[in-house]
Image: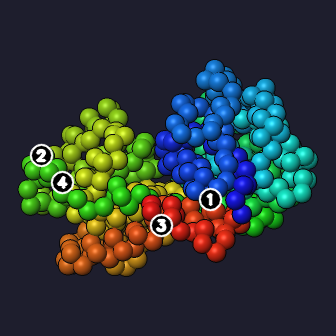
Amino acid sequence: MSGKKVLLMNTVAGKGSVGRIVTGLSTALKSRGCDSLICLGRWESPAGHQVYRIGSERDVYIHGALSRLTDRHGLYSAAATGKLIEKIREYDPDIIHMHNVHGYYVNYEKLFSFLKNEYALKKGRRIIWTLHDCWAFTGHCVHFEYAGCTRWKEGCHDCPEKKQYPASLLLDNSKENYRLKKKAFTGIKNLTLVTPSVWLKERVEESFLKEYPVHTVPTGIDLSVFKEQKSGLKERYGIGEKTLLLGVANPWRERKGFEDFLKLAEAVGDNAVIAMVGLNKAQASKASAHRNIIAVMKTDSIKEMAEWYSAADIYVNLTYEDTFPTTNLEAMACGTPVITYRAGGSPEALTGECGIITGTGDIGGVLEAVKELKERDRKKTGLSCVEQASRYRLGRMFGSYLDDVYGLRTDNQSEGYMHSV
C-alpha cells in the first residue's frame, strides 16, 4: 500500500529516544514508497526529512512559563496550533501519528477538537497516538507510581506530583485538567493507541481512554551500536578485577534511584565498584564522596554508552517508575545482565536467564541478586542477554508499526529496510 501520506508529530525529532523513533519511522515509510511529514515543537530539524516546525522557541518559553504559574500545561500555544492545523489541511495525510503531545508546544484542546470534528470524519483517515507515559489520562503528571497515586482512575485533584514535570510552582489545576483532557481525548473516530509496554497498556485500559483499541509495540534499539565490544574503561578507572556495577539515568533523580545507589555503594563492600553515568555537577560531587562510586557526567555519545555497558559486569536499574526503559535492552545487547526493581514496565524485557527482578527499594534484594549473577557462567549469561535483546531490534519495532498499526502490510513489504536495522 505505497503512496500513503503519514504525518508524524512529536516534541523533537532525531534526538532522544522518542525523537529517534520518529525519524526512524519516517525513513521506514520512505522504504515502503510512502510520504511523511514530521511536525516538531522544538530544536533543530533532522536532515533528510520533510519537516514542519510548530511555533517558535519563544512560543515554547512562554507556554512553559505560563504553565509553571497556572498548571495549565497544554492549554497555551493557540496561534501555533492554529497554523499546525492549516498545515495538516494542506498536507492532507492519510494517517496522523502523534507521540508526545505534552512539551509546551501545542494546544491540545484546539488540536483534538480539529481531529475529532474534522479530520477523523474524512473517509479512510486514521489517527495513531503513541503514549510514552501517563500524561494523557492524568490531571497533571507523566508518572504516578512513585507517589502511589490512583486519583487518575476516577478524577484527579490535590495533585501530589504538582512540582514534578510539567511543574507548577503556584496553582493546582489538576481537577480541571483532568476534566478537559477527558473531554478532548475521548469520542474520536478511528483513533488507535499504542504503548511501549504491557504495564502502560493496562493502565490505559483502567483510564478514561479505555474506549480505544491499544497495541503494545516495545521500543527497539540499534543493535549495530549496542553490541559487545572491547572496552578499556576498567583499566582507565583502575577497577581491576572488582565487579563493575553500572547505573545510567538522564536525569538522575530520587525516583530514578539516586539515593538507593548511594545506599548500595555503602553495602557492596570493597570487591565492587559502581559507575553512575549521567550525573550533574552537584550529584557527581555527592556521589564521589563514596570511595567505590565512579561519578560520570552526562554523555550524548551512544558509542561511549555501549563501552560502559560492555565493560560492566551487571547493569543495575533502581528506578521507582518507568514505562519501558531501553537502557535495560542496551545493556543486554552488550552481553550484560540486568537487575531492576519491580516498577512500571522495567521488568518486561527481562527473562530469568538475563536478569533478576527485586522488590522496589529492597537494597538487600539487590545485593543478593548481585551475588547470584556473579556465580553464574558469564559467557552463557551474556549469550542469553544478547539473544533476548535481539528481539527488540529497531527493524522489528518499525515493522510492527507499519504492518500492524498503520496497516501497510503487503506480501513482501517487511523485507529490506526492516531487516537491516
Q: Earlier in the sequence, mark 4 or mark 1?
A: 1
Q: Earlier in the sequence, mark 3 or mark 4?
A: 4
At 59% from the left and 31% from the top, the residue drawn is 42
Q: Which mark, by number, is residue 231? A: 4
Tell me, yes or no, whether the two marked residues, 1 and 3, touch with CB atoms within 8 Å: no
The reply, left or right, for residue 300 in relation to residue 50 is: left
Cα gap from disc 3 to disc 2, whole angstroms: 37 Å
At 40% from the left and 68% from the top, the residue drawn is 389
Asked which secondary structure carries label 1, the reply is: loop
Residue identifier under label 1: 32
At 37% from the left and 79% from the top, the residue drawn is 352
Q: Quadrant of residue 272?
A: bottom left
Number of residues whose C-alpha sits closer than 10 Å to that of mark 3, classed few (under 14), some (14–19) or many (20 or more): few
Q: Is residue 230 visible?
A: yes
Where is the N terminus found, in terms of image quarters?
bottom right
Asked which secondary structure carries label 3, the reply is: helix
Cα gap from disc 1 to disc 3, whole angstroms: 13 Å
Residue identifier under label 2: 236
Cα gap from disc 3 to disc 4, whole angstroms: 28 Å
Q: Disc 2 or disc 1, which is closer to the eye? A: 1
